[in-house]
């Protein structure tokens, strides 16, 4: 039987970041994942379809962990401003990092490259252990800790079990933690495209009646497209010939970057919202999508998960330094209280935005257009929203 202070299930961005943070603080950490970690990203290698917007505060924390510098510059693209406009009204708003004296609002990062960097950093930490590919078969808790049995028959023991195992988290289900689902009735068509005009390190999003359409800047000069729309429309768009898809995409985006000149592989991803009733159970903590799933319109999903990882790592590390049990209920409840207070307003705001921009009634269209214009000219409010876009209001990343 292998003893650890913490066993983390799920080796994606959130789980791997939590493992690096904990092992970097001296905790004995075992990270389990069903898949072998991706190979380190090579400069100039083709970019994957899955990208995340990592805001400035999260990037600073990842730099503190030693992982961010391991992501090749060719796989992360900074953006200094965000432009948003509404197809159903004259409303528009823009955010610029210069308003806060910051160089960037964030970066668009290839998920695979960030995960590879985190795993490379983890491999250099002496108190960390990776088991991948590995599958958790069963687990139980008692007053002494958590006892885990893997599919290969091996056993682990830890004082805390962490679930970073995704939206359909088996750990959340196994702990009997209910969740509230929000059916968006949408899918996202994702692809990387070349355009006639450069993106100029600007993230752009247009709200259409069927859902938001985002063009996110990539380091190779292309843009990552996330086109949220109805399930039927997404299926149709993904099946179109490349030239016809490019024409429809260009029209939906009002030609803001000129003609769409190249279209890469397309994929369709179902969208839904989910919020766990609790983030914790006996000797169990949930992170990231296992605790909350939000619509991609705000680009905050990965950042919320990284905030969870940072907060839990701080609480567990403090407990270990003080000689306390890292799986004790008081520490877990403190994690739940602080992260729910930070995450819940964001989850609710994204849900409200989804409903507002999906409304087709003329009075609501006029109201949201006026609201966007007024906010764009209200300096204090706009500054606060820009700080939120940078992640400067999330205290989990303080270090």
Image (tube, rainbow, N blue to C red):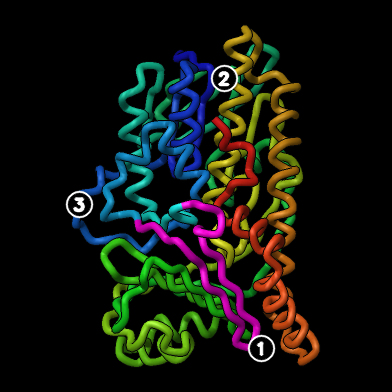
Residue numbers of the magenta segment? 77-102
Q: Earlier in the sequence, mark 3 or mark 2?
A: 3
What residue did someone put label 2 on?
317
Question: Comparing marks 2 and 1, which lies closer to the viewer?
Answer: 1
Looking at the picture, tell me which residue is in the foreground, 80 or 138.
Answer: 80
Total numbered circles: 3
User: From where the camera sits, is residue 36 visible?
Assistant: no
Coordinates of residue 33 in the picture (x, y in percent): 42, 37
Q: Which mark is residue 89?
A: 1
Q: Secondary structure at mark 3?
A: loop
Q: Secondary structure at mark 1?
A: loop
At a point 57% along the width and 67% down the height, the residue shown is 297
Residue 256 in the image: above or below residue 141 = below
Cα distance in 3D space between marks 2 and 1: 50 Å
Q: Quadrant of residue 363?
A: bottom right
What residue did someone put label 3 on?
43
Coordinates of residue 155 in the picture (x, y in percent): 47, 20
């Amino acid at each position: 039987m292998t003893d650890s202070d913490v066993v983390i299930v799920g080796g994606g961005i959130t789980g791997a970041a939590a493992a690096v943070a904990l092992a970097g603080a001296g905790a004995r950490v075992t990270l389990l994942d069903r898949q072998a970690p991706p190979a380190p990203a090579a400069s100039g290698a083709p970019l994957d379809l899955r990208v995340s917007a990592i805001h400035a505060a999260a990037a600073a924390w990842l730099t503190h962990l030693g992982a961010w510098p391991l992501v090749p510059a060719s796989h992360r693209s900074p953006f200094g401003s965000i432009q948003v406009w509404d197809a159903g009204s004259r409303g528009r708003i823009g955010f610029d990092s210069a308003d806060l004296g910051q160089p960037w609002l964030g970066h668009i990062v290839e998920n695979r490259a960030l995960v590879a960097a985190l795993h490379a950093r983890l491999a250099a930490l002496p108190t960390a252990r990776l088991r991948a590919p590995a599958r958790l078969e069963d687990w139980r808790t008692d007053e002494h800790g958590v006892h885990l049995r893997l599919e290969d028959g091996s056993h682990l023991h830890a004082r805390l079990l962490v679930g970073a195992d995704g939206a359909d988290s088996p750990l959340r289900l196994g702990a009997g933690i209910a969740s509230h689902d929000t059916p968006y009735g949408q899918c996202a068509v994702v692809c990387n495209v070349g355009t006639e005009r450069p993106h100029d390190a600007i993230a752009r999003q247009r709200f259409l009646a069927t859902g938001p359409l985002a063009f996110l800047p990539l380091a190779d000069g292309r843009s990552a497209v996330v086109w949220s729309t109805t399930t039927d429309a997404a299926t149709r768009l993904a099946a179109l010939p490349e030239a016809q898809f490019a024409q429809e995409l260009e029209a939906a985006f009002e030609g803001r970057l000129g003609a769409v000149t190249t279209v890469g592989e397309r994929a369709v991803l179902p969208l839904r919202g989910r919020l766990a009733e609790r983030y914790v159970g006996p000797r169990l903590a949930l992170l990231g999508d296992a605790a909350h799933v939000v619509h991609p319109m705000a680009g905050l999903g990965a950042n919320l998960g990284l905030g969870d990882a940072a907060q839990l790592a701080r609480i567990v590390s403090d407990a270990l330094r003080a000689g306390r049990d890292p799986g004790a209920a008081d520490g877990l409840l403190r994690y739940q209280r602080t992260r729910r207070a930070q995450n819940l307003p964001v989850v609710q705001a994204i849900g409200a935005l989804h409903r507002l921009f999906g409304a087709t009634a003329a009075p609501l269209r006029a109201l949201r257009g006026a609201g966007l214009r007024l906010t764009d000219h209200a300096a204090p409010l706009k500054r606060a929203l820009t700080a939120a876009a940078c992640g400067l209001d999330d205290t989990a990343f303080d270090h």
